[in-house]
Each structure stands twice: as structure tokens, then as C-alpha cells.
Image (spheres, helix red, strand yellow):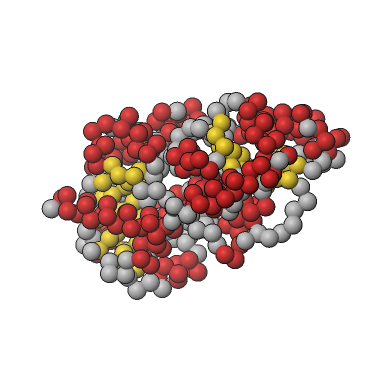
Amino acid sequence: MVIGIDGTTLCDARGGSGAGIEHYTWSVVLSLAKNFPEHQFVVAVPGQLPAPRRAELASHTNVRLLQPWLPRIPFLSRHIFLPFVMQFSHPSLLFVPGGVPPFGWRGRVVLAVHDLAIFEHPEWFPQTSVRSCTTRWLVPRALPRAARLVAVSEATRRQIARLKPELLKRTEVVYPGVEIPTEHLGNETVQKDTVLCLSTIEPRKNLEIACRAFDKFLSAHPERASMTQLVLAGLPGWKTEAVETLIEEINNRWLARAGTIVIARLGFVNEQQKWSLLHQASVLLFPSWDEGFGLPVLEAMAAGTPVICSNRGALPEVGGDAVLLVEPDDIQTMALLLAQCLLVPEGVQYLRVAGKARAEEFSWKKTASELMRVFERAVEGRR
């Protein structure tokens, strides 16, 4: 079978490894190529894909790369060039890991759907995104046209059912995976207990509540101010003013007692830095209002780091009994759970063991195998 892949989300806009959908696309494409040598994969790659990553893909004899002709005009490259050139490879279908197919593609398509929160909670997103052509027209039009939809969780599958109930029979759940890079084990010795928040700074991630819960923990245990830090790792997104103001207030309040800031913002972190942070953290705090999957929770469990996360979206589905769940607006309980992880670390040792065991249930090889079954059903369905 010849399978076309829209690989335009193989890296972020700067050519970096990216996160979220970029990480998902890269992991899926590599795993498909490695585990299914009997199939051919025609992958449309973005112009900014770095040469080493391009070479890694091309090293697989069953992978053929389609290079963009118009790297400076992304819309034309993806929506016109990609479908025009892809059709000459005669793929059985086009798989779109990013969820939005090229406008000009008229063949069979399988879409990965990560979440549809923007339709249910537009207040969490920039108005430019809410009113964009993609949100208002492309996605609602693309979902019914797909031969199959791949939801990354049951929570996302339920979102699809609420938005387009008639599509439920064509929707299958295929979970993402996790793989710890062995060269990034992060054995450094840290001087402070670290509460790690790993996410873009945006309203849905609920970082205001995270900061307030950490502040409440310090208020109950002021002697910990000089030896504990909340670390926010991730790029600023949108509607960040309230979080930034709150961080400044809390840091100013604790500066004299701690001798330094108690909430640190790292900004963007690459893969090596991310895994190092996960291995060193005392706990991952992930109180998001909603998640289509929640990859940082899975990665923290794989690293053996205890996790406190909200009980919304797919997070209970991903974490199971291996995480501490909390209502996303319950500051008091969140602060108590932080105290449990930071003050009695031996008491949450079971979370480290259970988290690793839970993470072993998710692998990119398993993801690729289940995706291939979806592709086969999509092709057979059309026949």
C-alpha cells in the first residue's frame, strides 16, 4: 500500500522539534516507516525541516520525501503544491496528523483529531484563531469528508460526537506513545525541590491556579520558600497578562524570605532540556481545564516523576490510578497535594512505580500498528 502523509507539521515554524502536534507527527512518521517496511510512505515535508531530520527520514528505503517548491508561501505550498504533487504517487489514502487536510486534496483522507476545544470554549483562544478560516470553515468541512477519523483519546472522541454525532461510527481512538531518549536521562544533582509546569502559557493550561496553589503551599510552609521553586517551562502563548502579573506579585511577596524568585519562567525548552527537567522535578503539576491527550503527563510518568493533574478532558484517561487527580479550580486541595509530594516524598514513591508501569502501556510502535489498521479499514471501506 502507498500511504501519503501530510508531514508539514514535522517541525515548528522555526525548524525546531516543536511540541504537541509536531512531536506527534514526527514520532508517528518514524514509527510507521520503521515498523512497516512492506508499505511505501510518501511524506510531504516543510521547507524549514532541518537537514539532519530530513536525512533521518530519507534513510528509510520505504520513505519518499516531497520537497516544497514554494517555501516562502506556506498556503500555496501546502494547499496547492502538496495535493497536486501527491496525486502522482497514487496513494491509497492521505494521512493528516495535524487534523486539517490540504484544501486542494480530493482523495481519500484519514484525519488525526487532537482536540476540538476551540469550538466548545472559544474564550480560551485568540479571536484571530476563533474567527480564522480554519476554525470556521476548513475543520467543519473536513471532518465529514474523512474516510476515518483518529481521535487521540476517548475524551476527544466524545468531543467529535458532541460536534458531529453522525461521525462517531467513523471515529476510532488511537493513543499517542512515549519513548524516553536514553541519552537524556538527566542525572544532574539539583539544589531545590522543583514543581514543574510544562506547557504553553495560555488560559486553557490554568497556570494562574497553579501559581496560587504553590503560593498557598508556601504560606502553609514558609520555611520551604528558600528550597522550593515552581518552574514554568514553555513559550508564552496568548492572554498571558494575568499570569504574568500574578507571578510578579508572588515573587515580590516571597523575595525577602526566599532570597530569590520562587516562580521561574524558562520559556522554550528543547527535547533534551525537557527530559532533564522531568527527571529532576519533584512533581509535575498539570491543572489544565481540558486536554485532548496531555502528553506531558505521560512523559512525566515515564520518567518516574509524580504527577498532580486536573480531572478534566483526557487526563484521567491517560493517568489512570498512577496520578493524583484534582478539580482544576480547587486551590486548597492542590496545595495539599503539593505538600504531600514535597514534604513526604517517600509517601508518593508508589506513584513513581505506578507511573512507569502505566507509561509502558503507551508506545509509538503500538500507535503505528493501530494506525495501520485504521488505514486498512479506510481503504476497504471505500472499496
In this view, which residue lies farthest toward the left?
Answer: 383
Q: x, y percentage for residue 235?
A: 60, 45
| Residue 347 picture quarter | top right
Foreground residue, 355 or 24? 355
Foreground residue, 339 or 150? 339
Residue occupying image coordinates x 47% and y 54%: 360
Foreground residue, 56 or 218? 218
Query: Is 216 rendered above or below residue 378?
Result: above
Q: Is residue 79 visible?
A: no
Residue occupying image coordinates x 73% and y 42%: 229
Q: x, y percentage for residue 361?
A: 44, 52
Q: x, y percentage for residue 379?
A: 19, 54
Q: Quadrant of the N terminus?
A: bottom left
User: Is 32 left or right of 243, judged from the image as shown?
Assistant: left
Residue occupying image coordinates x 61% and y 62%: 184
Q: x, y percentage for residue 234?
A: 60, 45
Residue occupying image coordinates x 78% and y 51%: 191
Q: Is residue 218 visible?
A: yes
User: Is 253 left or right of 68, judged from the image as shown?
Assistant: right
